[in-house]
Image (cartoon, rainbow, N blue to C red):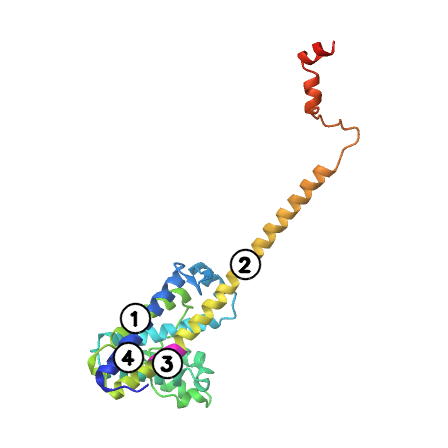
Amino acid sequence: MKCDGNSSRLDIIEFLVTRRLKTFEYLKKCLDGQALWLDAVVITPEDICRYCQGSDGAMEKRAQKWFFLGLSIAPLLDMANGPTFVSSLENIFQEWDYFFSTFVGQSWKWAMSKATWVVSGAVEISRRAMETSEPSSVQEAQPLQTLVVPSMCSPVDYYEVAYTLLEILSLVYLKFTDESSATASGYYSIVQVDAWFKDNVLSFLSKDLTAVSQRVVQQQLTSLDALFEGLKAADRGQEDDWLTVAPNSPMPQTRPPVALQDAQQPGAESVQE
């Protein structure tokens, strides 16, 4: 897309921010059960929790990575708007891609068991752990400067992490609407940051909500099938009651025809006499 001057770029950035803020708000409402996902299904936090418990653990791992992302981005919200803020986000993304790459991710659990938590907000692989363990990819790992990856003793809640991360992203995008970010390089960086959030957060969140909604629909259809089977059984029993005549049962009492009723009136008897 061709941009003519800072004003045009700023208009495009503001349009992008407005669009993303609406998306974040819609996703939060869907997570809370206040909006229909894809205008079809209501998803509650309980549905998400049940699906996570019955899944293969992919959603829990994703929630943990998003938790680290939120911890890393939150301190940046105190920074001034502008290219420096966007550049700090890009640094987090670079360390994220490096740390969670296939190369490092294979030894993630091992690294976390021997990690040293730094108060400044970084994780450094301790030298002793690197020296005493077998030669592996972790020895080549570099200390993280901006990505916060603390050692976790328990899994995080998917709903809480996703909802909180969406709120953080809303604040992040509001910091993009600054004139100092409307330069050619700043515009390009914001577009790259938006694409990264879309690929690593929004895309996976949409897939997860779709999977949960499919499970909810399946459960609802199963309950409807059971209900219909019960109604069919009740209908069959009712038909049997109507069609089955017990032996020696008295004949049902029926009213005589209207003409016969008129013939049995007192006036009719006197005329016949």
Span of residues in magenta? 194-199
> As shown in the figure, which amino acid type bears the numbered disc 1?
Ser
Q: CA separation, marks 3 and 2?
A: 34 Å
Answer whether labels 2 and 4 touch (C-beta < 8 Å): no
User: Which label belongs to residue 170?
Assistant: 1
Q: Which residue is mark 4?
A: 12
Answer whether labels 1 and 3 touch (C-beta < 8 Å): no
**Disc with the residue nearer the chain's start (3 vs 4):** 4
Asked whether residue 197 is drawn in magenta, I would say yes
Q: Which residue is mark 2?
A: 219
Is residue 128 in sight in this rendering?
A: yes
Residue 144 location in percent, x, y? Answer: 33, 84
Q: Main secondary structure of the magenta part?
A: helix
Residue 177 location in percent, x, y? Answer: 24, 76
> As shown in the figure, which amino acid type bears the numbered disc 3?
Trp
**Disc with the residue nearer the chain's start (1 vs 3):** 1
